[in-house]
Image (cartoon, helix red, strand yellow):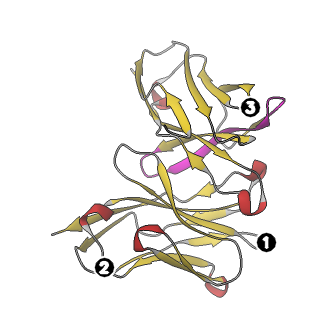
């Protein structure tokens, strides 16, 4: 079983709809992240969380919100989806700073907003 | 601000040929550097990482990378490329806010017969 699991793997939604992407991990890591990948732009950080009480905005948080329901669960929501939010979304975890900065990624969620 | 530049968007190599993917970084302190690979339809897998010490780092799948502080570079190399190496490669630097990584835009590798 994957250590970092994202659901759904693929989703098509309509403009204006609310959608939630879910991420769960079995690695026991405190830090969790949501990234967005667009062709030619690499991965950009949307939100990150140190624990259930600590949520922080990343580089491109506008139009997104997150919820850290438990140490193992971190959800990303699009309150009113728009076409330019069509992208590949990745959840990642890490064990902390220093030499534990390595990120472990889920398989990704491909979201299409029509 | 921390940043990563991967100058080559696409690279094509013949199977069996050597490979070098370039990565340049900007970071105010001693960086932690990473190379990840993304196969089609897959997540990102760590190839190798550098934190300190020996500047030549060995990774999985026969890859290695060399940290050159004077050139602010962390280039990825492989002596002989296999068709299965065709993928997207990302260089990353950290730690940044929240100990997140800052990624380059990626290099797409095509391997020809």
Is residue B34 found left or right of A9 in the rendered image?
Answer: right
SS type, badge 1:
loop
Of callouts 1 and 2, which one flags the residue occurring earlier in the amino acid sequence?
1
Mark in front: 1 vs 2: 2
Chain bearing mark 2: B
Q: CA distance from mark 3 to mark 2?
A: 42 Å
Query: Marks 1 and 2: same chain?
Result: yes
Cβ atoms at labels 1 and 2 below 8 Å apart: no
Q: CA distance from mark 1 to mark 3?
A: 30 Å
SS type, badge 3:
loop
Q: Is residue A54 visible?
A: yes
Where does the image place residue B110, in percent across and percent down from the top left? 27, 63
Which stretch did the figure color magenta? A38-54
Query: Residue A58: which quarter of the image?
Result: top right
Q: Which residue is mark 2?
A: B80
Q: Residue furthest left?
A: B113
């Amino acid at each position: 079983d994957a250590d970092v699991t994202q659901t759904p793997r693929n989703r098509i939604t309509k403009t204006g709809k609310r959608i939630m992407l879910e991420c769960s991990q079995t690695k026991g890591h405190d830090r969790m992240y949501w990234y967005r990948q667009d062709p030619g732009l690499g991965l950009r950080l949307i939100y990150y969380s140190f624990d259930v009480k600590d949520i922080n905005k990343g580089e491109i948080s506008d139009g997104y919100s997150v919820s850290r329901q438990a140490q193992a669960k971190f959800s990303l929501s699009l309150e009113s989806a728009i076409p330019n939010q069509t992208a590949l979304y990745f959840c990642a975890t890490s064990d902390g700073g220093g030499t534990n900065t390595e990120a472990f990624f889920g398989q990704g969620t491909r979201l299409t907003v029509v | 601000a921390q940043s990563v530049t991967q100058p080559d968007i696409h690279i094509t190599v013949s199977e069996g040929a050597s490979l070098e993917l370039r990565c340049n970084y900007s970071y105010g302190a001693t960086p932690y550097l990473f190379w990840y690979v993304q196969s089609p339809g897959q997540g990102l897998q760590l190839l190798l990482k550098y934190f300190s010490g020996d500047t030549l780092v060995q990774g999985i799948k026969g890859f290695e990378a060399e940290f050159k502080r004077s050139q602010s570079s962390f280039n990825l190399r492989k002596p002989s490329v296999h068709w299965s190496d065709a993928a997207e490669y990302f260089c990353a630097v950290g730690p940044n806010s929240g100990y997140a990584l800052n990624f380059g835009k990626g290099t797409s590798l095509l391997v020809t017969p």
